Amino acid sequence: MAIKNIFRATVQIVGSKPQDLGMWDAFQGGDYDTTETKYTPGDGEQRVYVGLRTTGNVTLDADYQLGIHDVLLRQVGTEVKANEDLRGQPVKVVVLERGADGNYQQNRNPYPGVIKQIVPPDGDSNDAGTIAKIQMVVSVGKPTTVGQ
């Protein structure tokens, strides 16, 4: 049995400009699936054909930290050159599991993909008790660029 708090994830930009995007407290998705076709020919027996293997997108969440996430947010947006914007950058998401010794080790194969979405934290100057969160969605698959 395992509880959810033994897991964390890291995100690294891979390629010509590697960059560590830090530790992320929560993640979901990355489910391993296949497409299926169900067919019932004239004999009345339903048959299942399994096709393309797919892996779902990974959504990561973290408590917003000045000095880490504000730097990340300055790398997205309309004022950033398209080739320097984090969106569309190839990344690797590594899920870590805390062992009995308290150290983290890789839990499964990394998820390669591209940054699809970054959701900045919401703000409310009247709310002093809610922790601000930042979110990132990684589209999982072989990273490619338009025209390849």
Image: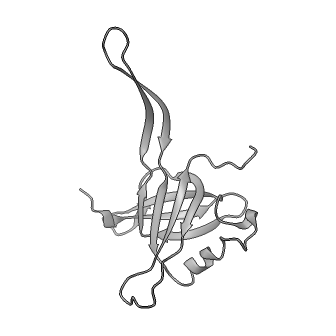
Residue toward you, 126 or 30:
126
Q: How is the image coloured?
A: one colour
Which image quarter is the C terminus in? Answer: top right
Q: Identify which residue, 124 or 96, lies in the foreground.
A: 124
Give the position of the N terminus as an image quadrant. Answer: bottom left
* Residue 147, placed above or below residue 7: above
Query: Of residues 139 and 5, which is closer to you in this image?
Result: 139
Rendered view: 122 above or below 6: below
**What x and y, as percent, mark residue 30?**
45, 51
User: Residue 117 in the image: x percent, y percent?
Assistant: 56, 62
**Number of numbered discs:** 0
Q: Is residue 132 left or right of residue 87?
A: left
Residue 33: x %, y % from top left = 43, 40
Residue at x 58%, y 58% (from the top left corner): 116
Above or below, comparing residue 147 to residue 85 in the picture: above
Residue drawn at the location 31% of the way across and 14% of the way down? 45
Name which residue lies at 57% across and 47% down.
141
Q: Specify the farthest residue to the top.
A: 43
